[in-house]
Amino acid sequence: MAASGKLSALRLPPLPTIREIIKLFRLQAVKQLSQNFLLDLRLTDKIVRKAGNLTNAYVYEVGPGPGGITRSILNANVAELLVVEKDTRFIPGLQMLSDAAPGKLKIVHGDVLTFKVEKSFPGSLKRPWEDDPPNVHIIGNLPFSVSTPLIIKWLENISNRNGPFVYGRTQMTLTFQKEVAERLVATTGSKQRSRLSIMAQYLCSVKHIFTIPGQAFIPKPEVDVGVVHFVPLVQPKIEQPFKLVEKVVQNAFQFRRKYCHRGLSMLFPEAQRLESTGKLLRLADIDPTLRPTQLSILHFRSLCDVYRKMCDEDPQLFGYNFREELKHKKDKPLEREEEESCGL
Ligand code: SAM
């Protein structure tokens, strides 16, 4: 008796299926908004299981849509689930879930790019950064056009310990286009190594936990989808401001198939380019003929530390942006054919 009582407390009561919810509320996916829904509750359960132990957790789900992942989270015995959804059409279906799980589900009609989750959960959940992660989790299957800018924003939040990371080292389980998931975890020397690999890995332990084939979604996207788990590191592998790291990494990958000195030289104004690039690489102890993809996080750490010193010696340097210089000069087009298409 006790066991079945416990079970009924954990599980949602019988509800229409997600497919029925979609029909009931006429929730046709809007292709332009890249709405691809997961209807298979075994898959949504798997995403939630891989997010970690959610017992009594406070969970922030981004882009719940018709609520497949939302149901799996509610079934994981969480203390509270906060969902932020931009498209009003989904709110009544989510409300039905909220009625089925009284007091557990909070629905916000809003935009995850601006929503401030740091004010949403009890302050008592906060843990010192060095402790184990707090019982706060972020989970979401967002359109790819939103998930990439959002992870960059959250990586900056991790570096500054603000936003969702005021609670401590909040874990995230998010979906990306498979190719982006592969970049996020790409190791030194691999073909997929990119800006995103360095930016994510200097701040987090990043795992591509599994891939969901495109055909599992309705409508089917062009690509497969990677589920990625992030845990912020106690000690970032590069200890410089996020914007400085971003600038060094962005320049290094400017010409990804050329020697690394080529992209890094663009950190410096033309008049001092040759000399300063030589100094940067010498002091950072880096072979100028390594390709950007061959640079390890430790290499980037040295580059950022030396570049920081050079910026301290020359306060104008950090503000220098070669693109601005080019705009003024209307110079010959840059050799940008090799820059990654999405810029990351
Ligand atoms: N999570 C659901 C699932 O897995 O079936 C829906 C996935 S669908 C790819 C993405 C959802 O995110 C849609 O419901 C869409 O309306 C919502 N969305 C898109 N951009 C958003 C934003 N900036 N803020 C909040 N929600 C957003």
Image (spheres, rainbow, N blue to C red):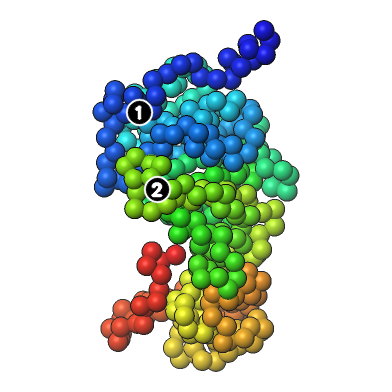
Query: Is residue 202 depicted above or below 312 in this figure?
Result: above
Q: Quadrant of residue 160?
A: bottom right
Q: Quadrant of the N terminus?
A: top right
Q: Is residue 90 visible?
A: yes
Q: Quadrant of residue 56?
A: top right
Q: Which mark is residue 214?
A: 2
* Residue 199 spot, x, y in % from top left: 55, 62
> Which mark sits nearer the N-terminus, 2 or 1?
1
Q: Is residue 218 left or right of residue 9?
A: left
| Amino acid on which the number 1 mark rests in the picture | Arg
Q: Nearer the viewer, residue 58 or 31?
A: 31
What's the CA distance linking mark 2 and mark 1? Answer: 18 Å
Q: Which mark is residue 241?
A: none
* Residue 102 spot, x, y in % from top left: 50, 16
Q: Is residue 191 left or right of residue 35?
A: right
Q: Is residue 108 visible?
A: no
Residue tagged by mark 1? 19
CB at disc 2 and ligand 1 closer than 8 Å: no
- What secondary structure is found at the residue carrying circle 2? helix
Check disc 2: other Cα within 10 Å, few if <14, some if 14-19, many if 20+. Answer: some
CB at disc 1 and ligand 1 closer than 8 Å: no
